[in-house]
Image: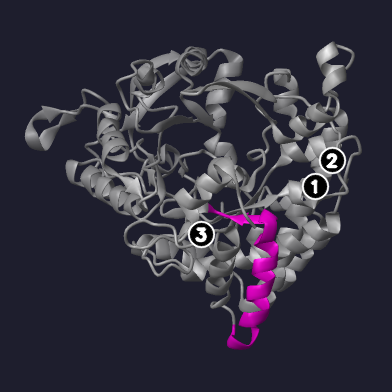
Amino acid sequence: MQLKGISEKVFLDRYSLKDKAGNALEKTPDEMWRRIADAVAEIEEPGGRKKWAKKFYDAMENFKYVPGGRILAGAGTGYSVTYYNCFVLPSPQDSRQGILKTLGEMIEIMARGGGVGINLSTLRPRGERVEKVNGFSSGPCNWAEIFSLATRDIIQQGGTRRGALMLMLWDWHPDIEEFITVKQDLSRINGANLSVAISDSFMEAVKKDEDWPLIFPDKNDPDYDTQWDGDIESWKALGKKIKVLKVVKARKIWDLIAEAAWKSAEPGVVFLERYNKMHNNSYWNKIICVNPCGEEGLPGWGVCNLGSINLTAFVKGYKVDKPGEFDFEALSETVRTAVRLQDNVVDMDPYVFPGIRKTQLEGERRIGLGTMGLGDTLIKLHIRYGSKKSLEFIEKVYKQIAHEAYIASSDNAKEKGSFKMFNANKFIKSGFMQTLPEDIRKKVAEDGIRNSVLLMQAPTGSTSLMSGTTSGIEPVYEFEFTRRDRLGEHKIRHYLYDEWYKKHQAEVDSGDLDRPDYFVSANDLSPEDHVMV
């Protein structure tokens, strides 16, 4: 398969195997697929490796299934790089040594190609006394500057991209107002994404226009240095004291978030308490932060083990004026193979820190299977993004992906064993498992499940560019735009729209024909339609 344009550039720059001088040794994706398939199949029993290598290759061929970028760049290369796109580190201990330890861990992960998420809620607020040096704390926002600087100016991940960092702070932290507004100063923390961790009680206070206390543990508690991990509810449950440092209206905080997001596109919000109520591992492993792109909540030392189904590859018979049909049977087969491949990756990673090994290899065996190409798929089916028909199609597709993934993981568990911390009774009672059909829950209870978490939707920015399709679940941004370079102005059209335009150019140029409504861009959509998808 020969790529062209931006697809070829992304492949050669980011994912093809390089020699020591950085020159691409792989010229086509076929070579990359073969390298990955052979490497991942090595995890299988010797007698099954040839069969699985072929199945893995067939799933990836023509970008039907696209493993995460770190797998594409690292599998089978012999380099000691991680196959996981992103990590969450435990919150730093509230000391200079603890903060610098976390900084060092972040740098080591980023140097091997991983992005990092860190919740800074363990850190005492600005102005709080630091008794040992007779000084005062500068607060988490100032410490965030150091993490940001290292990410922006020092690290180049796996030799191909700059570091990626997410920093979070809980809604109860006394420095939350500064955290929310800090990036309105464009010179501050510009090497990290910021998000506020939101609790259910905060949202209730917003709805009722109630006061909201900003609190922090009593640092004089003898267990502060050993037991404070950033979870304020667990601290309270231990009977530990907290200090109320300020009281504000909850709506003031909420309005600050909305205003800051409008002005500077940050911070994001993550409903972290709700996340913990729904996720499969809630009975033994708490989610504390999200990864840099925000798609996956993770525990301390948790990882993103990513892959995406390219939905456009399953549209058959599409022609410019004739909608295609979606091949659900082929989708099911590819999902099952993808689950197997990503599970094998768990056994391949070099695991730079023991905590990652314990949480992932010896604990969760987490994978994150998602999609790309939804926008292009709907166009090929002549379905308007955001319409009732699109929502019905999306419901059917994503249910099938979820169900097939859980069935495949349960089948793999029957063959290879469940993840180590699997407890059938507790697992099937999790918030998400309760949304699955009874027959799947029964199968998991009886046969177990290989992977504690299976589904996740990444933005797929670079991998979708390489694959030549729309990113993640997003619509086409715009169908026609002007690019300016040294040679002048050039009109660029989205490839599906370009095909349609060339066939109907005379009618379009004369004003006798408008483009069909299924050619809907992000700029055409109402906010409601976009959110509904």
Could you give the CA–CA distance between mark 2 and mark 1, rounded to whole angstroms? Answer: 6 Å
Q: Nearer the viewer, mark 2 or mark 3?
A: 3
Q: Give the amino acid type for the residue marked by disc 2 in the picture.
A: Phe
Tell me where residue 95 appears, x and y as whole percent. 20, 41
Q: Give the amino acid type for the residue marked by disc 1 in the picture.
A: Val
Mark 3 lies on a secondary structure that is helix
Q: Residues within 10 Å of mark 2 (few under 14, many from 20)?
A: some
The magenta-colored residue range is: 45-68
Q: Is residue 530 above or below residue 458?
A: above
Could you give the CA–CA distance between mark 1 and mark 3, rounded to whole angstroms? Answer: 25 Å
Mark 2 lies on a secondary structure that is helix
Residue 186's mark?
Answer: none
Name the residue beneath numbered marker 1: 397
Q: Residues within 10 Å of mark 3 (few under 14, many from 20)?
A: many
Give the residue drawn at x 52%, y 51%. 11
Mark 1 lies on a secondary structure that is helix
245 left or right, relative to 27: left
Tell me where residue 485 appears, x and y as whole percent. 49, 24
User: Is residue 533 among what the camera can see?
Assistant: no
Is residue 164 within the magenta segment?
no
501 left or right, relative to 16: right
Q: Nearer the viewer, residue 493 or 294?
A: 493
